[in-house]
Image (cartoon, grey):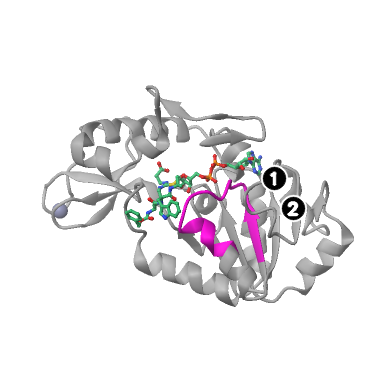
Amino acid sequence: MVLDRVTDELISIFEDAMRVAVLTGAGISAESGVPTFRGGGGTDVWTWRGKHITELSSAELMATDPALVWEWFDYRRGMLKSVAPNAGHYALADWEKRFSPFTLITQNIDDLHRAAGSQNVLELHGNIWKARCLRCASVFDARESPLEKNPPTCMVCGAAARPDVVLFGELLPETVFERADKAAHQCDLFFVIGTSAVVYPAAGLPISAKQCGAKIIEVNPELTDISMMADYTILGKAGEVLPRFLRNRA
Ligand code: BV8
Ligand code: ZN
């Protein structure tokens, strides 16, 4: 069912839910001024130096030109320095206090969920403010932007480090994906917010939840590959729609 607002029926489904899981994508950060990857909702398609994300954020480019990969991520870090969470991020931080268990799964590497106060965030694709050593695999905060040196070097052994993000062609961090997959299988209500749901294995999570009997609510200004199997699609912006679920607070 496609809706243009949060109906009473949706409010009661929300209030009756016991185990809630949420998957977010770039769309939830759009109202904070972060461009999305494939556009939609009036946001522009993101290319850089004429290249698309699947090429820039690829294991292949990391192997052939790691300095360019760092430049690409440092360009995004520069942009993210001046953005703040929006009402959509804050609403999800509120939901975390209302439900237990509540699992927030994000494809975003922008750290905005944590900045909005969400505690239990599963970052499927990593975090742009962290770096990982290519020799000893130590993970450390790399918050300076622009980068002092490219590549940044490991705090532990001094070797070159890479962005601690999952690139296309790379496996997701096992434990993180396992926890996300478990939450999808065990929830009774699964929200899909601000994602075009084309990148796997993340896009498979709402499908698993549906197969396990969960209700699927999608929030997106546009229909997506998930809309067909979602029980409800609310055509709207996350920052405007999500706060309406906790109406006594809106
Ligand atoms: C892997 C980190 C094993 C870096 C990212 C099965 C089928 C087909 C392909 C594959 C498959 N399995 C694996 C693949 C390959 C690939 C893949 O899925 N390719 C896609 C392109 C088809 N997957 C992988 O490579 C994964 N690894 O599978 O390893 C393996 C190994 C070798 C070979 C095969 C398999 C790793 C994927 C992770 C890559 N890293 N990010 C970085 O950020 O640079 S993915 C990155 O892109 C994001 O994290 C996110 O996941 C994705 C972008 O998607 P969205 O977030 O949804 O953003 P998008 O712009 O598309 O959509 C925004 C939506 O928001 C729109 O719908 C818009 O309408 C909406 N919106 C706009 N404004 C608002 C809004 N919504 C609400 N409110 C608003 N205001
Ligand atoms: Zn090291």
Position of residue 45 relative to residue 113, above or below, is above
Disc on the earlier residue, 2 or 1: 1
Residue at (58%, 48%) from the top-left corner?
195
Nearest the viewer among 121 and 206 is 206
Region of the chain picked out in magenta, as a range:
190-206
Is residue 204 found inside the magenta-colored segment of the image? yes
Nearest the viewer among 63 and 35 is 63
| CB of mark 2 near ligand 1 (< 8 Å) | no
Q: Quadrant of residue 129?
A: top left
Q: Residues within 10 Å of mark 1 (few under 14, many from 20)?
A: some
Where residue 178 sits: x, y (%)? Answer: 43, 71
Amino acid found under the numbered disc labelled 2: Thr
Asked if the residue at tag 1 contacts the one at tag 2, i.e. Cβ–Cβ closer than 8 Å, the answer is: yes
Give left or right: position of 161 versus 144. Answer: left
Q: Which residue is mark 1?
A: 223
How many numbered marks have been drawn onto this rendered protein structure?
A: 2
Q: Quadrant of residue 71?
A: top left
Query: Callout 1: helix, strand or loop?
Result: loop
Where residue 222 sits: x, y (%)? Answer: 70, 41
Q: Which residue is mark 2?
A: 233
Where residue 167 sits: x, y (%)? Answer: 34, 47
Q: Quadrant of residue 93?
A: bottom right
Residue at (86%, 64%) from the top-left corner?
9
Name the quadrant of the N terminus. bottom right
Amino acid found under the numbered disc labelled 1: Leu
Query: Callout 2: helix, strand or loop?
Result: strand
Is residue 232 found inside the magenta-colored segment of the image? no
Q: Is residue 250 visible?
A: no
Q: Is residue 234 visible?
A: yes
Residue at (67%, 54%) from the top-left corner?
91
